[in-house]
Image: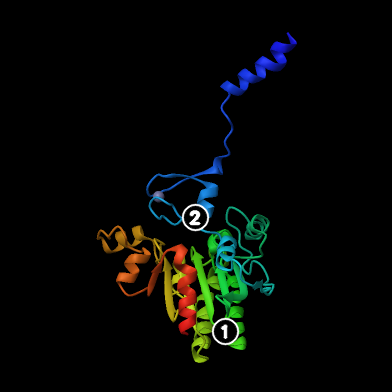
Amino acid sequence: MNWLTNFVKPKLNALVKRKEVPENLWNNCPTCGNMIHHKDLRENLRVCMNCNYHFRLSAEDRIKILFNNEEFNEIKLDIIKDDPLNFNDKKKYKDRLKEYRKKTNRNDAFILIEGTLGGINIISGFMNFEFMGGSMGRAVGSAIVKGTKLAVEKKLPLIIFTSSGGARMQEGIVSLMQMPRTVAAVDILNQNNIPYIVVLTEPTTGGVTASFAMLGDITIAEQGSTIGFAGKRVIQDTIREELPIDFQKAEYLKDHGMVDIVSHRKDLKKTLINILDHL
Ligand SMILES: [Zn+2]
């Protein structure tokens, strides 16, 4: 009996029972349907090896990939008073902030770095889509201003990687004020002849597209990324016209003169170093 219960039964169970597979072990490519193991996807910089679809990359991963084998320091951002409008929707804005801070281990949706790229010193900023969709409120605006001030002070080029759903609606007019604020900050870069490069990544939309994201001396877009102000459906309904399939995609914007370079994620670092070398 012991032999049956202790040995045969577990063996049979192991044979019959389906193995529990963690849900996030495999990623399904939304374009070609290719099933990709998360390790392979990570090794391939989160790009589908079959069709080159670029999966969204977190700011943390992007920093790791970009500064791989190079020096970098994260710059401490100023503490900004939360929730200027005392805003509640389904949840209190203060509670949402708490939740995202716990989830991302960051205070808000922007990471500022001083580092070297191909041996050239730079200041770079990364919008963090993981934090409330990378939305731009007062904290993000302040971080961008801080980045531009540092670039001017240290006479270093500024590179900003955008990934954002736009303005942070929980901050209402205060978030909209970040648009002129960041535009003015970029203008100070121009006045001081500081190179400003923008890398648009999936997705860059709304108030971010309508402000500092489109003001780069050189604008690079990551292959296949969505870049636009209003959503495609909203525009279609307004103008009552069918829009092309690739409307608001990086390649379409390059064809129409809004973007200078469309880059595969694998070539992005090389492209940036090339530009910095020329500057
Ligand atoms: Zn694919």
- Specify the farthest residue to the left: 241
Task: Kindly identify which residue carries mark 1.
Answer: 156
Residue 172, position as x, y percentages in the image: 54, 68
The quadrant where residue 244 appears: bottom left
| Colour setup of the view | rainbow
Type of amino acid under label 2: Asn
Task: Kindly identify which residue carries mark 2.
Answer: 44
Residue at image x 50%, y 65%?
Answer: 163
Q: Could one spot residue 202 in this view of the protein?
A: no
Secondary structure of the residue carrying tag 2 is: loop
Distance from label 1 to label 2 (Cα)?
31 Å
Label 1 environment density (alpha carbons within 10 Å; few <14, some 14–19, many ≥20):
some
Secondary structure of the residue carrying tag 1 is: loop
Residue 96, position as x, y percentages in the image: 63, 57
The one nearer the camera, 33 or 37, is 37
228 shown above or below 38: below
The one nearer the camera, 178 or 257, is 257
Residue 15, position as x, y percentages in the image: 58, 22
